[in-house]
Amino acid sequence: MSFQLNCPNCGKRAVSEFTFKSEFKNRPSPEAEFSEWTDYVYFRENNMGRQIEWWYHRSGCQSWFLAERDTLNNSDHKSFWYGDLGQHSKKSDGEA
Amino acid sequence: MAKRITKHQNFELPNLGEEISFTFNGKRIKAFAGDSITSALIASGSTLLSRSFKYHRPRGAYDVFGQGHESLVMVNHEPNMLADRIQVQNGMVVKSQNVWPSVEFDLGEVNDLIVPMLPNGFYYKMFHKPKWLWPIAEHQIRKVAGLGKIDVAGTHVHRRYEKHYRFPDVCVVGGGPSGLAAAKGALDEGKQVLLIDDNPQLGGHSLHSIFPVNNCENKSLNGIPENQAVQKLIKELAQNPNLEVMVNTSVFGLYEDNLVAAQSGPDLFKIRAESVVLAPGATDRHLVFENNDRPGILTARGVEKLIMCHAVLPGEDTVVVTTHDGGFHTALLLKGAGANVVAVVDGRESGSAGEFEEQVRNLAVPVYKGLTVHAAHGKKRIKRIDIGPISGGDSHKSFDCDLLVMAVGFKPQVNLLSMGRKRPEWDSERQILRVTDLPSGMYSTGEVHGSAGFARLFSEGIKTGKAAAKKKSVESSKRSEDELIMALPADIESGGKNHFICKCMDVTRFEAQASIEEGYDQVESLKRYSSMGMGPCQGKACHEAVARLAAKDTGLSSLDAVPTTMRPPFSGVSFGVLAGRAPHLSPIRRTPLHQCHIDLGVKFLDAGQWKRPDSYIDPQIEVGYVRNGLGMIDVSTLGKIEISGPDAIDFLQFMLPGKYGKFEVGRTRYSIMVGEDGILFEDGTISHLEQGKYYLTTTTGNQDAINSLFQWWLLVEDFDVQVKNLSLANAAVNVTGAESREFLQKLVKIDLSNEAFPYMHCRQTSISGVPVSFYRIGFTGELGYEIHFPAEYGESMWNHLMTEGEGFALNPFGVETQRILRLEKGHLIPGTDSDALSSPYETGVGFAIKDDKADFVGKAFLQDFKKRGIENKLVPYQLEPDDPIPDDGVAVLEKGKIAGRVTSSRLSPTLKRGIGLAWIRNEMAETGNNFTIRLANGSDVVATVLDHSAYDPEGLRLKS
């Protein structure tokens, strides 16, 4: 892992500056079944290919952002703020 | 014999610099400042550099570029240095490695005599059974095998290793004509260029070439020999301010996104380039024949370098074996230096003579066509060689000689192009292994693709450099015949006992063939079974021969010749370089009170990145200060987060498992934190300082993590809250002990009496005009006040308190003291006494959870934990007086089986016995129960489960 990640604030930086949190998932509703919670906490999609992930620019601006990344080769990833998720999803759908 | 020459017929010899001396195995050797260790040794007549790994065969200089293992020596007590690469310095102490008693007379050589008894896979087969034999055998084997000795105690070698970073537009690896041209191409496009070479000078093999330059697109270079052309090019580039040159620097790895890793002495360079141009060139191909490892057998480019850069003629009576005109170039240089060239043996049957072949023939040197070397004779130095047909059979002729020069084509240094990603393939037109498909952003040029001739290398380099600058692909162009190296290998076809393929690990063609017979007929398994390519050079010298000969010996066509996977590191890397400091990535953090601690003669403790006081005198004594009077500790490393805004209380209700419905101003509460998984990971306090303004403290280790966690939750959940991280803005001390109230009351205007300021309350006031906040909490188990104040008053506040405390026997105490104090009270530290499986209920902090409130972090899992009940429990325990103190982490036993573990264990000076916290099974956890702790030395000690804490279980002192 030596690739560079784009921070929406700081631009391209070595991945060692960032902390990976998880794949992007929506938190279950408070009323959800316990099995839904265990899925949320313990299960990962482990996609081979593109997925949206949470990243934190630990050694930089200390911001949280989302990145769509190809887990196979880290190529051509796109970083954006959480607030722009809807816009990003729309665009990705359009491309597909 | 080898000697230093003073003039050469074909060119001007270099200035060798001043005369100096060094020692080699205790012998004084004269040298010039410009010498490498190898060139100086050869000039002084030393032939032996080292002994081989397994058979302890004598080894001498071979390629003179430090590719193989031959030149590994100890330099000034540092092992595994490449004599070929190291410039001599006055007084340097150089020693051979892996020899006993000496390199000249090595008893390990007996291994060579018993080769028939050491077949391939010897270690696997011989010591497989009986099992008890291996440890004994291993000990003996390790004594005779292995490399230099590390100065473990550090008595001789003191080095500071550093990491450096570079961000050029274009990084060019290799400073030969191709690399120089690529750098020029990129510079002409206005780019910042970093040019790296592992030799002391730029120029590559052109430095040793008198081939005249023809048809070069840079007209000013035409008509002069390559060595002058390259100097001219270097001089031109040196003027360019956009160029940085690093010599004596080896690139050992290429990683994702154009990360180039390079070592230069004790320095590691991490280079991130927009584009990388690889121009690593090629080295002379390995030739396999009987005794091909003997001293006195050198590569052509090595010999040329010795003559032209060091004015050293490495032998007198010389035979050159070749398959291309370059071999005749070497013969001519040897002749010009005064050597007696006995013969040139040319593996090619026919074909028109090249320019240098003509010149050599004109000098009446005998040339033998269609033949190759069959065998070398002589042990510590070759005396004679036999030549014969490539197909094998009887040898035709023998020559007496002390130098055999191998110029049988080139082996491109494809390692960096491959690096575990792209496997090289055999190119039958060019007769080399090639990597043609590179990851994007990477470019390659020059001899690594078999290109030849200065003009070709120059134009190709310029084109590649320009493409790299523009991040465009390079269009390949057709090469004419004289623009390619095109030299066939010339190994004799039959294998033999001493035909060394891999010299590092002493693997012969005979052994390789036997391994193939045994079924290891895939190159990767062949490598692992025979250990070919697994020595110090990691296959740099032999991978091409292994691929070619393995293909041949398994009956495959040369097209199917594949080398084993090439991975980093390309060259040897010192551990120090990898472990070197990176202070900007992991800074040392000091509290605002740091200097105060130093002035008090503190012993520091590393707590993550922080330097914290461990103790000032002795933790056991410091505990007494707190228990009997007054102590003060620096707790500035606590995380301190201010939370305010309309939704502040809702946010806390959501983040923390406690209930904060009736949380009045001036109150302080203990709080734990759990993740969504319900696992305890943090505890601290939360105080309601002013209306709507809350102050949360976290443990030292979680200072940054909790701030970032809060930021994340504020992003995904809808709270109107401001979170202010005051961790570094505020310093803090804890003043604790029965006298603390009386002492502090002198300094503040607020009423500190128990009635006005009870336990678990907070107040804001000032000390000498400095705004401070007081938190009455009790980690130590005594009456105490945590005082937070602006960090800029750090030292003066500490010193003020120390001075004012003189009448009160105020003493500072450290973190280790605090650990004992809290253990006497049975307080846990999350992460020390809990782990990633610890439910808060089992950990004994269930009282801090109120799960009957609306949605909060971890609610679902906490409810589940509660339902499942308690299996294991964290309990405080004590030992009998005089019982030994267990180490942290030892096991708890029940009926001889592991039933838990001790997480913290100390001698309590207050109770004069061992105390601690342990995880045990719930049914064992009843108060007063005994359980067994197994000590590290194997003996057992019996512990008693305590109800609450060992010291002041009622908490009377705390609340007094």
Image (cartoon, coloured by chain):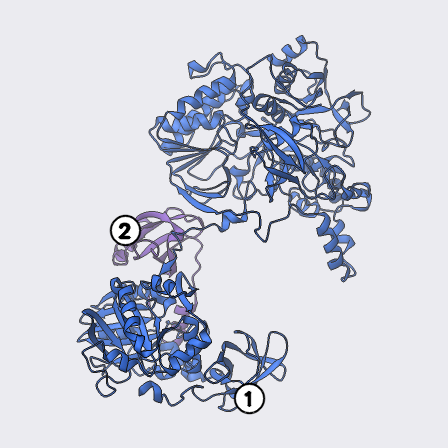
Chain colours: A purple, B blue
Q: Position of residue B215 (x, y in %)?
A: 47, 14
The quadrant the C terminus of chain B occupies is: bottom left
Towards the viewer: B355 or B133: B133
At label 1, the amino acid type is Asn
Q: Which residue is pictured at 67% across the width and 9% down the height? A: B363
Towards the viewer: B240 or B846: B240
Q: Position of residue B318 (x, y in %)?
A: 71, 20
Disc 1 designates what residue?
Answer: B930
Towards the viewer: B651 or B663: B663
Tag 1, which secondary structure?
strand
Residue furthest to the top in view is: B362
- Residue B796, compared with residue B860, is above or below; it is above
Q: Which residue is pictured at 61% across the width and 40% down the height? A: B537
The quadrant the N terminus of chain B occupies is: top right
Whole-angstrom CA distance, mark 2 to mark 1, is 59 Å
Q: Position of residue B782 (x, y in %)?
A: 35, 82
At label 2, the amino acid type is Asn
Label 1 resides on the chain identified as: B
Quick check: can you spot residue B517? Answer: yes
Label 2 resides on the chain identified as: A
Tag 2, which secondary structure?
loop
Q: What number is the disc on residue A9?
A: 2
Q: Categorize mark 1 by other alpha carbons within 10 Å: few (<14), some (14-19), many (20+).
A: some
Quick check: can you spot residue B917? Answer: no
